[in-house]
Amino acid sequence: MSSGTSSPLHVVLWNGLRSLKLTLVSLFLLAGSSVLGTLLPQNLPLAEYHQRLGPVAVRIIRILQLDNMYHSWWFYGLLGLFALNLSACSVHRLPGVWRQIFCPQLMPEDRWLQSRPLHCNWLDSRCPEVVTRRLSEVLRGRFGTVRRSQKDGTVWLFVQRHSWARLGAYVTHLAILIILLGGVVGGKWGYRGYLTIAEGQAVAHLPLVGGEGVRPLGFSVRCDQFVIDYYANGYQPREFRSLLTILEDGREVPGHVRVPVRVNHPLRYRGLTFYQSGYDTDAGLLRFSVTPRGGGEPFDLMVVYGQSVLLPDGTALAVAGYISDFEGKGPAAGLELTSPDGQRGRAMAFQDPDLLMGEAQAPYVFRLLSIEPCRYTGLQVSRDPGVPLVWLGCLLLVVGTLAAFYFSHQRLWLRLQGDAGGTRVLMAGHAHRQQGAFSGRFEVLCQEFRNLSKEQP
């Protein structure tokens, strides 16, 4: 192609940026990326990817950030490309639509009016001023403001309704861009983690997902109580909830004391949202009867699961595990014993008094008396500063969709010209959407105006 017929580079780039092909390609790539992000588990340790997929796949995952795909550089690039394409399409078409709404053609030629699919004409025996006034009254009641123009004795009337419906598509485009912006803001400056809090415990740091470290909350959250409601069968949970209290500098925050948190009913505080996501139950406080093997009075001993206590001879005792039913023999606890000289041993403690056990070398025999379970609430904690933008975008998306598909920009032009027999009227109409419905309304209006023309002057 010769230089005389080639387009400037900026024109080529602009045409490519606003092309439908780019829209389809960007949408296809985003959809494919979403499928990949669904199939490939996200935010797992690299060692787990190595075990599942091998070393070559791990190198690809690290380079392309596939383990955290929705925060990767190339995914943000795809979002940016789609946003640019959508913006370019809107900017290219919006000026023409804007002119049709706010700068309509007020005095079109007869040939243009007669070329409209919807047009009709009639002769009114009255003078132009009377006809103009009468038609304006009817149009004002049906369409609103009537714009009148006059030139060389000819009068034009123009009315329109629902002109803003043409902007529905552009409001929808803007909504999509705002939603994308909200997602980027949330992904860039937001974070998410999980808390496991035992009843009565307070935490002030949030472990982040994906091994991204620990983030201080800036306050403490305490689990005062965890409640599980069961169905009538007694073992299937119907609802579980946490009663949480927010602490600032060790003091309870008014209005945030024992706040119930249930599934789909989160707690929000200082930009953080606490969702009820799970629970767990573990042995909390265990009470044992300890009998010296060499003789002596048995004594009771209280042990907190996960901690150790000293026995009278200096042996350290810790609960290593708990089983609600050990091989059909009932509840049992596994014990770890550490003698004063550092030797380690193990023992079992059963609730059944006929099953008193201990290592032969251990100076004690243990019996499990009771267990006070400790419940843990599982909370998902997230901060997403992009949520307000997403909600705004969703609202605009609904408004734009309703305007684009359920309303139609309807316009009428009337030309009135004096004639020897009175006033000749030519009317044309157009609707940018729902032409069938508007066509029926146009025919009814034509018939009504023809009937008005038969009124006595």
Image (tube, helix red, strand yellow):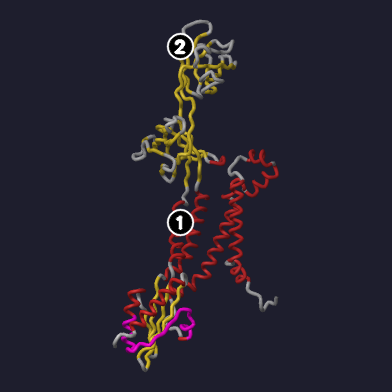
Magenta-span inclusion, residue 118: yes
The three-letter amino acid code for the residue at tag 2 is Phe
Labels 2 and 1: the sequence-earlier one: 2
The relative height of residue 203 versus residue 352 in the rendered view (above or below) is below
- Residue 11 drawn at (x, y percent): 60, 71
Magenta-span inclusion, residue 371: no
Pick whichever, 442 or 72, lies toward us.
Answer: 442
Q: Which residue is mark 1?
A: 394
The three-letter amino acid code for the residue at tag 1 is Cys
Residue 67 numbered tag: none
> Residue at the left extreme?
456
Q: Quadrant of the N terminus?
A: bottom right
The residue that appears at 39% across and 76% down in the rendered structure is 444
- Residue 102 found in image quarter: bottom left
- Residue 59 found in image quarter: top right
> Residue at the top extreme?
295
The relative height of residue 405 versus residue 236 in the rendered view (above or below) is below
Residue 299 numbered tag: 2
Pick whichever, 388 or 38, lies toward us.
Answer: 38
- Residue 338 drawn at (x, y percent): 56, 17
- Residue 357 found in image quarter: top right
Q: Over which residues does the magenta segment extend?
A: 111-135
Label 1 Cα crowd, 10 Å radius (few <14 / some 14-19 / many 20+): some
Q: Is 299 situated left or right of 17 in this image?
A: left
- Inter-mark Cα distance, 2 to 1: 67 Å
Q: Quadrant of the C terminus?
A: bottom left
- Residue 271 drawn at (x, y percent): 43, 46
The residue that appears at 48% across and 86% down in the rendered structure is 111
